[in-house]
Amino acid sequence: MNEYISELLNLAGSAVVLLVAIVVITRIVGLRSFTKMSGFDFALTVATGSIVASALLSPDMPVLRGVAGLVMIFAVQWSAARLRSSFEPVRKVIDNTPLLLMKGPHILEENLLAARMTRSDLIAKLREANVLHTGQVRAVVLETTGDVSVLHGDADGPALDWDMMLDGVRR
């Protein structure tokens, strides 16, 4: 029984150390570390979770090694963010490009195919956005995060500012 309590206390201590490490590192690197901005960011978030789980649950991985792993993952993310903001070729490799799926009421079939989405997937996203008919649709964009943005409004509403709303979107 004492061995079990000792193991639980060790696990609790490890969890506290890892949590504090994540909070401190996130404060240093910034909250963008956990945003869902690109596939790269998603991979880093998954890697962070994997390191935390391994450090907590694997007897072969000391908690300080887990903290070191977290520091390395966050350092890679921070470095990539710096490179991405400074060099266009790096940004093109790391970041996804938003993709226009509908322009007004017209479905862009080639882009839907490029996104590996079906018409049914698109229609489901329109329903989620409370679109009642395709005449309400101004644009549908597959974002860099994998989310689908549905821009809609009344047909007699203000015109969509295409330059602002679709800056950087592959059409």
Image: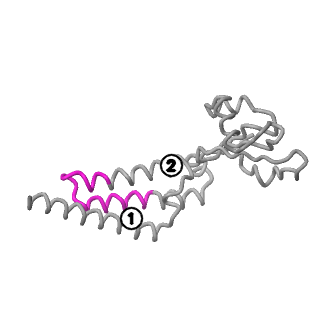
Number of numbered discs visible in the structure rendering: 2
Asked if residue 27 is among those painted magenta in the image, a careful observer would answer: no
Rendering quarter of residue 72: bottom left
Residue tagged by mark 2? 40
Return the x and y of residue 27 as percentages of the image width and height: 46, 70
User: Which is the main secondary structure of the residues drawn in magenta?
Assistant: helix
Return the x and y of residue 29 as percentages of the image width and height: 47, 67
Answer with mark 1 or mark 2, whichever residue precedes in sequence. 1
Q: Amino acid at mark 1?
A: Ile
Residue at the (14%, 61%) spot, across then down: 5
Given residues 16 and 28, the one toward you in this image is 16
Looking at the image, residue 13 lies above or below residue 155: below
Count neighbours of disc 1 (C-alpha within 10 A) and say few if under 14, some if 14 to 19, many if 20 or more: some
Residue tagged by mark 1? 22
Magenta region: which residues?
Answer: 53-76
Residue at the (65%, 43%) spot, across then down: 148
Looking at the image, residue 43 lies above or below residue 118: below
Looking at the image, residue 119 lies above or below residue 127: above
Q: Amino acid at mark 2?
A: Phe
Quadrant including the C terminus: top right
Q: Secondary structure at mark 1?
A: helix
Given residues 92 and 168, the one toward you in this image is 168
